[in-house]
Image (tube, rainbow, N blue to C red):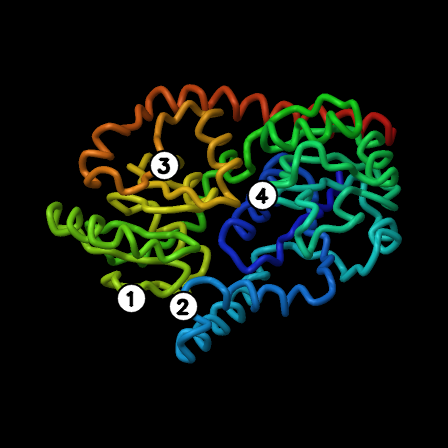
Amino acid sequence: MKIGILTWFFGNNYGARAHSYALQQIFRNMGHECYMINYVPADAWKSNIIMNLNCGQSKKHPILAVRCLIRCIKFNKQRKIYNLSDKVKCAEDINKLGLDAVEIGSDEIFKLDHPFCSDIYFGVGINTSKFMYAPSSGQTPEDAVLSIQRINSIKKMEGIAVRDKHTQQLIYNNCNKNALIVLDPTLLYDFSELISQNIHEKDYILIYSFSQWNEYKNKIQAYARQKQLKIVCVGRYCKWADKSYDTADLSTWIGLFSKASLVVTDSFHGVVFAIKFHKQMLIFGRGDKLNKINDLLNTLQVCVQFYAGEKEVELHLIDNSIDYKKVDVILDRKKEKSEKYIQLTLDKISKRGV
């Protein structure tokens, strides 16, 4: 089958790149011809730059602002990892691509107040057989009201599967449909071909966060000294880290997770990749990410509390140790369920096309 993926593949953050690439490779490994639908909302490039400049200290320091722009340019060049379709500007253009199916998701494409959110990500106007895989509504209230066009489009989908309970409830409240909860695609794919072998760092704490969290700096530094670990930051500049990979590509980002001794993060995909590589975690609770991180931890029964500085880091880690043997058993079961959903949905679409 010829499948098109409709998601925010263009986002200038590692999670967006990772989940988009994972879905593309999953469909390819199933024997399908797969394309990333090359739909980019107007002003997306400008919005990406603004969001990156607002992260950390870039607004206050011209040199960091320049490095932020370099990171955005590098991200844009990394689109070569995708098999992009012809450029499209609307749903009608997607209908002309000659696809057998359009997959919608993942990412927070149902987050109603996001500047990129629009009818097209709900499949409105797309006449090709369509199904969703792991979209999220982020912090959108569960009682938010979707337009009639969006509701009707969802009801016509061949498969309805979301990433979290919050989004599941939003769909049910609006469409009276019971959406299946599936894993984020990054948990279905191993990324072995993308893990950089050029990571020369050893014995380090990896910080991947969207905020500085300077209030916990002393405790993290004390733990690093105690354990003789360096502090490495990826994705932005951190003035109290020993080294910052603020313009790292996706391969380096994944490689740094794979070799870290401890992961410090406030990011959903930061937690995902810490779990994938069986890492100890120090998770900060950032308001707009609480729902999805909590849902992920509960789904995989990862018994970790958010860190609020109430204890020394070592004591917190002891109290929040992770039984990865148990997590892997649950993860394997969830993977099987998620992969089965994809296969059954594609089988249904294929039979209708015969």
The numbered mark at residue 57 is 2
Left or right of residue 49, residue 94 in this image: right
Task: Kindly report the distance in space between the C-alpha atoms of the residues bearing marks 3 and 2.
Answer: 24 Å
What element does badge 2 sit on? loop
The numbered mark at residue 25 is 4
What element does badge 1 sit on? loop
Please state which of the two labelled residues, at mark 4 or mark 2, is closer to the viewer. Answer: 2
Q: Residue at x 56, y 68 (%)?
A: 49
What element does badge 4 sit on? helix
Q: Amino acid at mark 3?
A: Phe
Left or right of residue 159, residue 151 in this image: right
Task: Kindly report the distance in space between the C-alpha atoms of the residues bearing marks 1 and 3.
Answer: 23 Å
* Residue 258, quarter of the rendered image: top left
Task: Kindly report the distance in space between the C-alpha atoms of the residues bearing marks 4 and 2.
Answer: 35 Å
- Where does residue 340 sit, x and y in percent of width and height? 62, 23
Q: Nearer the viewer, residue 28 or 215?
A: 215
Task: Kindly report the distance in space between the C-alpha atoms of the residues bearing marks 1 and 4.
Answer: 36 Å
